[in-house]
């Protein structure tokens, strides 16, 4: 079945997994931008302490466990020069004019933070979470793209046949999951051979004993239930038989 560019785009962006992965990547990018990258200097470079004084305290739009995160500007002196910095904390005690130690990198005195604070709103933990979100989102997007490519190849060289559900296996949920899943084994014939299509679902009642299967003529093992494809693709495939 010929597919236009519009069809391919509609097919690709109809994947909920793709949107979920992109959302995780976007969240990761936002968190990375607000995470405490410079804290790495305090772990891998020599650090010293200098006396400092808070200049201003201002509210931010961020929170940690529903506790508002505040921003602090401050000044400190190193080697006869005055430096300014910005830090973040949930501390409600710090006030303008308060004297407080400032931690700074010896090789780069401009990189500093008030003692007990972070350089960015989310801190080092936010950096770790951002990386986990980014990796998770990337994996989901890559899997979605791979699945979409297989289904596009299937739709471009599609044939329809009937499949019979042979049996259903119930999977025991893990300790971290309460949802019970079922494996539905459908069997169909193509090119004088038998193939099995596996469907994993939490709602086996949504599937009938006999279902229409779409498979790729060149690679019959590449198949999907017609009912699982986007509606516009179902209509096109039904038209082309």
Image (spheres, rainbow, N blue to C red):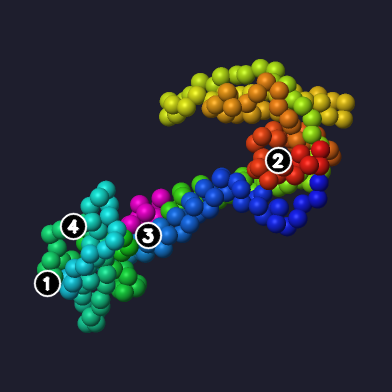
Q: Is residue 77 above or below residue 225?
A: below
Residues at marks 2 and 4, CA–CA distance in whole angstroms: 58 Å
Residues at marks 1 and 4, CA–CA distance in whole angstroms: 15 Å
Q: Which of the pair 240/155 is nearer the observer?
A: 240
Q: Which residue is mark 4?
A: 91
Q: Which residue is mark 3?
A: 35
Q: Which residue is mark 2?
A: 234
Q: Position of residue 63 (x, y in %)?
A: 27, 55
What residue lies at 66% left-to-right and 42% top-to-bottom?
Answer: 231
Callout 3: few (<14), some (14-19), or many (20+) C-alpha neighbours within 10 Å? Answer: many
Q: Position of residue 103 (x, y in %)?
A: 25, 66
Q: Which residue is mark 1?
A: 97
Residues at marks 1 and 2, CA–CA distance in whole angstroms: 69 Å
**Which secondary structure lies at badge 1?**
loop
Task: Give the left or right position of residue 21, taking residue 88 as reference.
Answer: right
Part of the protein shown in magenta: 122-129
Q: Is residue 132 above or below residue 201?
A: below
Q: Determine whether label 3 and label 1 are within 8 Å by CB.
A: no
Q: Determine whether label 3 and label 4 are within 8 Å by CB.
A: no
Q: Position of residue 44 (x, y in %)?
A: 38, 60
Q: Position of residue 107 (x, y in %)?
A: 35, 72
Callout 2: few (<14), some (14-19), or many (20+) C-alpha neighbours within 10 Å? Answer: some
């Amino acid at each position: 079945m010929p597919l236009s560019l519009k069809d391919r785009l509609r097919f690709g962006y109809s994947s909920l997994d793709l949107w979920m992965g992109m959302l995780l990547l976007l969240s990761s990018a936002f968190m990375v931008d607000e995470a405490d990258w410079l804290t790495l200097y305090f772990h891998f470079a020599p650090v010293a302490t200098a006396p400092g004084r808070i200049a201003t305290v201002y509210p931010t739009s961020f929170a940690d466990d529903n506790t508002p995160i505040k921003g602090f500007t401050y000044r400190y002196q190193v080697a006869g020069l005055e430096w300014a910095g910005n830090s973040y904390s949930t501390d409600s005690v710090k006030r303008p004019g308060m004297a407080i130690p400032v931690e700074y990198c010896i090789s780069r005195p401009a990189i500093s933070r008030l003692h007990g604070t972070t350089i960015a709103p989310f801190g080092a933990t936010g950096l770790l979470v951002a990386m986990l979100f980014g990796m998770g989102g990337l994996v989901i997007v890559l899997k979605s793209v791979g699945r979409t490519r297989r289904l596009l190849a299937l739709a471009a060289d599609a044939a329809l046949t009937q499949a019979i559900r042979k049996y259903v296996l119930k999977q025991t949920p893990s300790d971290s999951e309460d949802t019970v899943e079922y494996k539905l084994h459908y069997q169909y014939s193509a090119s004088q051979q038998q193939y099995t299509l596996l469907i994993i679902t939490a709602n086996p009642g949504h599937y009938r004993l006999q279902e229409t299967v779409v498979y790729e003529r060149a690679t019959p093992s590449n198949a999907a239930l017609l009912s699982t494809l986007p509606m516009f693709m179902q209509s096109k495939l039904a038209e082309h038989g």
